[in-house]
Image (cartoon, rainbow, N blue to C red):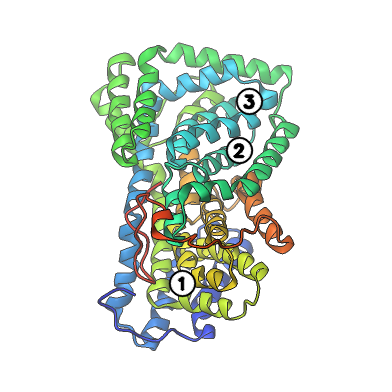
Amino acid sequence: MYDDTPRIPMPSLPIALTPVILTIALLALQIFYYDDFTPHIPLAIGFGITALVGWAQGYRWSDIEKGAFHVLHVAMPSIATLIIVGMLVGTWLASGTVPLLIYLGLELINPTWFLAASMLMCSLVSLSIGSSWTTVGTVGLALVGIGNAFDVPIYWTAGAVASGAFFGDKISPLSDTTNLAPAVTETNIFEHIRNMMPTTIPAMLIALAVYFFFGSAGDSSAESLQRIDMIKEGLSAHFNFGFWQAFPLLVVILMAFKRIAPIPALFTGTVIGALVAIFTQGASVHDVLTFAHAGYSIETGGEALDSLLNRGGVSSMTWVVTLMMFALAFGGALERTRCLESIVAAIMKRLSGFRGLQTSAILTSIATNVVSGDVYLSIALPGRMYKPAYDRLGYSRLNLSRAIEEGGTLVSPLVPWNAGGAFVMGALGLSVTSTDMSALLYIPLAFACWLSPLFGILYAQLGWFSKRAETNAQTPENTSSGSFSHTAGMTGTPLEAEK
């Protein structure tokens, strides 16, 4: 618990479930009955319900407020990253960086294997730099543009990008969540990565096969190829291409390799993109300031090219940022009032064997992702609470670290109000309206992200790849030495982290 919070007993399971069930019901009513994908107000009402439950349990308003603000404070780097990515998109479009990547992609990538190439490219970049968010906001953005030119539905491209970016992040020793999972469970990071291979490899291979099978998922007719040529000609006509257009991207990737935090790295890329736009594309200072705030704007005379280029800016992230804030405040209140702790404790009481334990650990991480909107909490909370059960049954905590990584890192981009899902939607321009929710199809099409947890559950039921505990397996010298080697208290949120 937080040090300044009165030690109030956990609420009973029915009381702990009350705000969760009512909030889910409100979300379902808003999204499915009214066909309106704006979860903001149902989540805000959920926060209010949680506050009332906490008040009835003996918490003061200041306690609940601190819980919400604590989670928001920890998530501020993620929110700031979203805002900066909006700025980066606007200036990189103006500088010609994104148009250059789109042009080269149209030259080099065959439409018939575009989706598979997208997943592999994002996997390699994310594995190399350890950041799914940076991968989505840079390479993923360009791939969406290429996919639009190939007439690939944006939800197919977004699914392939999310599959690659978050899977590369999952197995990269440079990733924050890949360090957090073994740190919470007190296991070795490289053993943790090796232990994830049995679920990682088949999930990636199946996803790759599906993307190859469906090809471009778009139109490869002569008319479509002619449209691609027109887009390439339009890009060449309106932008000067050369080394300087690639320079902002090279700087950001180099800074990521040097382990410079995403916020200064992306902001540096934004500033360099603005300078390149001024000195090579003829933009004014006022132009780049406007593009960074309101998004890039151009009229080329071609509808397809204009829809490709007119995007970005801080304002484009407003819907996503406010959604994250509502979701995180709700999750923080649930954590502060010990509702989440009560639910997990009730689950653990009903577990008698490894199969149920492993399955519950995965599902608890997934549920925490959905309810709290915070990927770090979805790893830290079940990781801390399930550890004793694995020790008691004689199974290695590596099973637990794999479970919470799969239910946490990989499910995060599949929940639109989670930090990961909100970022994917905002960075790739996945817009949802009451008349068109097709953009949400990226969720089932991100095959690698949901196949891995399914394999984890399957292995648990069959007893496959279920490592038994070894003598001294969790000694301090064997634990992760990453940046997340310390965790907060039982209901604290893991530490200043960002994707």
Badge 2 crowding class, 10 Å Cα cut-off, few under 14, some 14 to 19, many 20 or more, is: many
Residue 238 placement (x, y as % from top left): 43, 15
Q: Is residue 201 left or right of residue 37?
A: right
Give the CA distance from mark 3 to mark 2. Answer: 15 Å
Residue 373 placement (x, y as % from top left): 46, 60
For residue 160, which numbered disc appears in the image? Answer: 2
Give amino acid for label 3: Phe
Closer to viewer: mark 1 or mark 2: 2
Q: Is residue 49 visible?
A: yes
Element on which disc 2 rests: helix
Q: Is residue 50 above or below residue 218?
A: below
Q: Nearer the viewer, residue 175 or 14?
A: 175
Q: Nearer the viewer, residue 357 or 74?
A: 357
Q: Is residue 30 visible?
A: no
Give amino acid for label 1: Gly
Earlier sequence position, callout 1 versus callout 3 = 1
Quarter of the image for residue 273 reads: top left
Q: Nearer the viewer, residue 408 or 353?
A: 353
Quarter of the image for residue 212 reads: top right
For residue 150, which numbered disc appears in the image? Answer: 3
Residue at point 38%, 71% (across, down): 491
Q: Looking at the image, do the residues carrying marks 3 and 2 touch, with CB atoms under 8 Å apart?
A: no
Of the 4 image quadrants, the one containing the N terminus is bottom left
For residue 46, which numbered disc appears in the image? Answer: 1
Give amino acid for label 2: Ala
Earlier sequence position, callout 1 versus callout 2 = 1
Badge 3 crowding class, 10 Å Cα cut-off, few under 14, some 14 to 19, many 20 or more, is: many
For residue 488, which numbered disc appears in the image? Answer: none
Give the CA distance from mark 1 to mark 2. Answer: 33 Å
